[in-house]
Image (tube, rainbow, N blue to C red):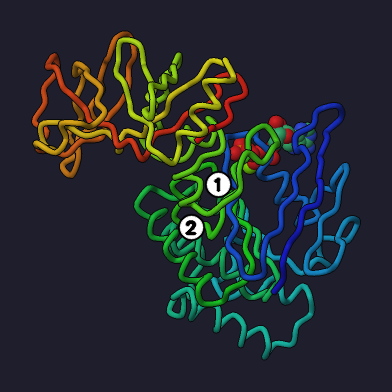
Amino acid sequence: MARVQFQNVYKRFGKVEVVKDVSLDIKDKEFMVFVGPSGCGKSTCLRMVAGLEEPSDGEIYIGDKLVNGVDPKDRDIAMVFQNYALYPHMTVFDNMAFGLKLRHFPKAEIKKRVEEAAGILGLENLLKRKPKELSGGQRQRVALGRAIVREAKVFLMDEPLSNLDAKLRVETRANIIKLHQRIQTTTIYVTHDQVEAMTMGDRIAVLNAGIIQQLGTPQELYDHPANMFVAGFIGTPAMNFFEGAKVVSEGENTHIVLEGVGKIEVPEQYKKQAREAAASGKPLTFGIRPVHLEDARLVGENGATRSSIDATVDVVENLGNELQAYLKSGNKDFIATLDPRANITPGKSIRLYVDSERIHLFDSESQKAYF
Ligand SMILES: Nc1ncnc2c1ncn2[C@@H]1O[C@H](COP(=O)(O)OP(=O)(O)OP(=O)(O)O)[C@@H](O)[C@H]1O
Ligand SMILES: [Mg+2]
């Protein structure tokens, strides 16, 4: 097993720079996720670790070894691709054994490794079948099996679940996490799906336009997004943004005023940053996640002093365990995730309490977070 390091890595295709100054230290045994929208450079980063692309600048280390210029086959990595074509004419056993045979492993060793991997992946009873006799999820596990038998130092997975249906994705996702808990191989996992990233990663690197926007644990990214891109990308439904926020201080109190929408008290821990934001004179954007709004009527008396927003209801989606309410306040549209007891209907007015411990404030121009 091994750590993997990126040191000031760039990748250019002709004049186009698709990876920009990526530095990252992936710990031994860590499950690191690269997440970001299509075209942001995730696969390119992974392919540079695999040796399928060379960095234009910077260094990549696997373990303590600088791997720039090292052949893919000498890097001790195993990769699972999005399109993991299995050999249709070969059995599950032979599909898993293929890479080892190519490398002239002894027969007994191949058998031992394939059976071990099959045990881990629950494929023991399917070893004699051909791929067409397997479900999508089982095929996916064979593809993982091919990587496991290599006993590589690092696993690289590029959207390995993207061709499974929603239910199988969730199931296979859990299988991969279990697999990692068991064999603990350092893994880099690429996805554009933030839910996959949140549920699987020990840490997540959020990429956009070839730049790491933020690196952290799922909770850190959710609670303290560094900028509006991460704030909007992590969490569903996405964070609501209100432009044109004003910070107003009176004596000890500091508020964020949203013209025509409401006035939100800034809690003690964010007062300093809020005042800095005001002093900068720059346009500001207020952020609140839909789940951090609640129907005031369900809160009762002690809510009387809380910060609130008044809105009218546009559309309500009932998911059984929660409501997604599409709301309007002034000329601003936003979403609140409410308790089904909220009992709201389109056209009605509603007062929402804002969980002021969970508010965010951004510089509208640089898009960086003050908190
Ligand atoms: N061989 C190449 N030549 C030129 N441009 C390339 C090449 N490979 C990738 N690119 C470009 O580099 C950018 C990053 O591509 P990459 O495949 O890393 O994106 P990605 O984040 O994996 O996206 P997706 O989620 O769609 O797989 C894209 O704009 C892509 O068009
Ligand atoms: Mg890709």
Q: Is residue 322 left or right of residue 130?
A: left
Provide the secondary structure element on which disc 2 rests.
helix
Report the quarter where the N terminus lies: bottom right
Q: Residues within 10 Å of mark 1 (few under 14, many from 20)?
A: many
Q: Nearer the viewer, residue 316 or 213?
A: 213
- Looking at the image, which residue is at 38% across and 31% down? 266
Q: Which mark is residue 335?
A: none
Where on the image, by quarter, is ligand 2?
Answer: top right
Q: Residue beneath label 2, please?
A: 200
Residue extending farthest to the right is 69
**Residue type beneath disc 2:** Met
- Looking at the image, which residue is at 59% across and 80% down? 114
**Nearest-to-viewer mark from 2 and 1:** 2
| Residue 228 locus on image (x, y percent) | 52, 30
**Residue type beneath disc 1:** Thr
Residue extending farthest to the front is 251
Q: Is residue 95 visible?
A: no
Q: Give the total number of marks visible in the rendering.
A: 2
- Looking at the image, which residue is at 48% across and 81% down? 119
Q: Residue beneath label 1, please?
A: 191
- Label 2 C-beta lies within 8 Å of the nearest ligand 1 atom: no
Q: Is residue 306 left or right of residue 230?
A: left
Q: Are marks 2 and 1 in contact (CB under 8 Å)?
A: yes
Q: Nearer the viewer, residue 26 or 248?
A: 248
Q: Quadrant of residue 252?
A: top left
Q: Nearer the viewer, residue 73 or 46?
A: 46
Q: Is residue 143 left or right of residue 246?
A: right
- Mark 2 / mark 1, whichever is N-terminal: 1
